[in-house]
Image (cartoon, rainbow, N blue to C red):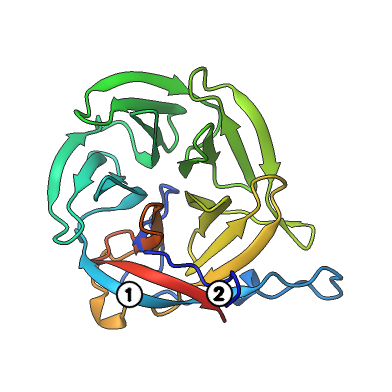
Amino acid sequence: MAGLLLGFGLVFLGACDGHQSSAAVSAPAAQPAAVVPPSGSAEPEPPTYTYRVVNTWPHDRGAFTQGLIYLKGVFFESTGLNGQSTLRRVEPQTGRVLQQVTVPAQYFAEGMTELGGKIFQLTWQNQKGFVYDLGTFAPQGEFSYTGEGWGLTTDGQSLIMSDGTEQIRFLDPATFRVIRTIRVVRHGQPLKQLNELEYVKGEIFANLWQTQLVARIDPANGRVLGIIDFSGLLAAADYARGTDVLNGIAYDAAGDRLFVTGKNWPKLFEVQLSPK
């Protein structure tokens, strides 16, 4: 598809917003408003992408997924809810938790990423993040920020953070100072509810909370480059009490694979994308 087909393994993990969706149990439908341009808009609608499932792997139905990355053959996952939040190392083929640290009960864990041999993990409303050693999960420090913490990723230099608004912040990983901020817009209108983030081939992929959609965002200016529609990814038969929204994106740069999952989903998916 002339540069449009992305060989990704998409692992869908739960949104990193801290809220449980009212769509739990019933399979959520994509929201048309997120893909239809406003009346009279001169700006062309960004392309919509669909998916093909390449592999399906087990995922812990009890994991309220808030952050997900793929690194060195395993998944690292941040799970949320007060008293249930964790940082995990997970075996892809089985979904088995290989290593885990429990986050103190007063914190609701959110997005997570790795940079420079350290794992950085946000919390929802405590304005505090945690730093861990990649290998041992030993605490390495804490950092603070204003507002809520939702999604977290990295471009290899900065930490890139969402807070549920249309704003995405770029943070210095040493000082946690805000280097710059972009405003995500479609047709000049703010695109809010940006949740779990992943940096993929020079773009920011962002779950749109309470939808089956992922936005592809230009990190230079916040322009929406495309919308991925994951409607129907988790079959209705796989929904149960507590099954929540699509959330969790991971990318295997070495293998050019994209993975996605959701909050309390029993499955994780490797997918390929193509224009719809």
Secondary structure of the residue carrying tag 1 is strand
Mark 2 or mark 1, whichever is nearer to me: 1
**Residue 144 in picture, x, y percent from top left:** 47, 22
Secondary element at image label 2: strand
- Mark 2 → mark 1, Cα distance in angstroms: 16 Å
Q: Position of residue 4 (x, y in %)?
A: 58, 71
Quick one: quadrant of the C terminus? Answer: bottom right
Q: Amino acid at mark 1?
A: Val
Q: Does residue 127 sit above or below 261 in this rendering? A: above
User: Is any part of residue 107 visible from this angle?
Assistant: yes
The numbered dot on residue 180 is none
Q: Which x, y percent locates residue 162?
A: 54, 43
Mark 2 / mark 1, whichever is N-terminal: 2
Position of residue 83 relative to residue 28, above or below, is above
Residue 253 coordinates in the image, percent (x, y)? 41, 52
What residue did someone put label 1 on? 54
Q: Viewed as shown, does residue 238 lie left or right of 36? A: left
From the viewer's perspective, is 225 left or right of 119?
right
Image height check: is 85 above or below 224? above
What residue appears at the point 33 percent right and 33 percent down from the top-left corner?
107
Amino acid identity at mark 2: Tyr
- Vertical position of residue 128 compared to residue 31: above or below: above
Q: Residues within 10 Å of mark 2 (few under 14, many from 20)?
A: many
Tell me if residue 26 can be seen: no
Badge 1 crowding class, 10 Å Cα cut-off, few under 14, some 14 to 19, many 20 or more, is some
Q: Which residue is mark 2?
A: 49
Quadrant of the image occupied by residue 11: bottom left
Residue 122 lies in what quarter of the image?
top left
